[in-house]
């Protein structure tokens, strides 16, 4: 199952707060409609410093496709607000699958990716 897992997100390292604020309005229901039945499990992590979508797809190839689909949904969310921020998401978005996704998830959970290390 690990090879079918993915994360797509932005965080405080390279994405302005304005972008993260707009993305926070993208709900789990909207994301579920975007991915349809192609994602078996999905979790949304939204804080002031990050917006991440974790998921498990039906195959490794589908995990890559779903991360691209979710990136497009994030871009549409930025464009729908009539903001000049749409291009900003490409600069700081990350997409990881498999072991890279797991490594990133543990870094986030242990606060190694926080603005202040150790802050939860």
Image: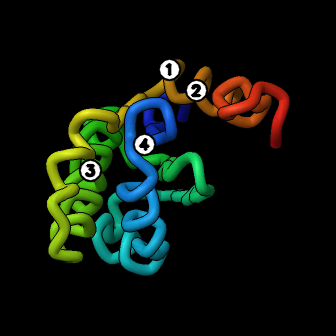
Whether residues under marks 3 and 1 lie with C-beta atoms below 8 angstroms apart, the answer is: no
> What is the quadrant of the N terminus in the image?
top right
**Mark sitting on residue 100:** 1
Whether residues under marks 2 and 1 lie with C-beta atoms below 8 angstroms apart, the answer is: yes
Residue 82 % position (x, y): 15, 74
Judge the density around disc 3: few (<14), some (14-19), many (≥20) Cα neighbours within 10 Å.
Answer: many
- Mark 4 or mark 3: which comes first in sequence? 4
Q: Is residue 42 above or below residue 110?
A: below
Judge the density around disc 2: few (<14), some (14-19), many (≥20) Cα neighbours within 10 Å.
Answer: some
Badge 2 marks a residue whose secondary structure is: helix
- Mark 3 or mark 1: which comes first in sequence? 3
Label 2 vs label 3: CA separation? 18 Å
Q: Quadrant of residue 21?
A: bottom left
Q: Which residue is mark 4?
A: 10
Q: Which residue is mark 3?
A: 71
Q: Which residue is mark 2?
A: 104
Badge 4 marks a residue whose secondary structure is: strand
Q: Nearer the viewer, mark 2 or mark 4?
A: 4
State the residue at coordinates (52%, 29%).
Answer: 101
Q: Quadrant of residue 31?
A: bottom left
Q: Is residue 90 above or below residue 33?
A: above
Residue 105 % position (x, y): 63, 33
Q: Is residue 33 above or below residue 56?
A: below
Label 2 vs label 4: CA separation? 12 Å
Q: Nearer the viewer, mark 3 or mark 1?
A: 3
Towards the viewer: 75 or 16: 16
């Amino acid at each position: 199952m690990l090879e079918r897992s993915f994360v797509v997100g932005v965080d405080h390292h390279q994405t302005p707060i304005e972008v993260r604020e707009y993305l926070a309005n993208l709900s789990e229901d909207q994301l579920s409609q975007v991915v349809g039945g192609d994602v078996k499990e999905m979790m949304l992590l939204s804080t002031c410093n990050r917006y991440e979508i974790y998921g498990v797809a039906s195959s490794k190839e589908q995990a890559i496709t779903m991360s691209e689909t979710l990136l497009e949904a994030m871009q549409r969310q930025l464009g729908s607000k009539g903001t000049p921020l749409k291009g900003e998401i490409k600069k700081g978005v990350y997409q990881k699958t498999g072991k890279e996704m797991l490594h990133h998830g543990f870094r986030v959970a242990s606060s190694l990716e926080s603005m202040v290390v150790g802050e939860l």
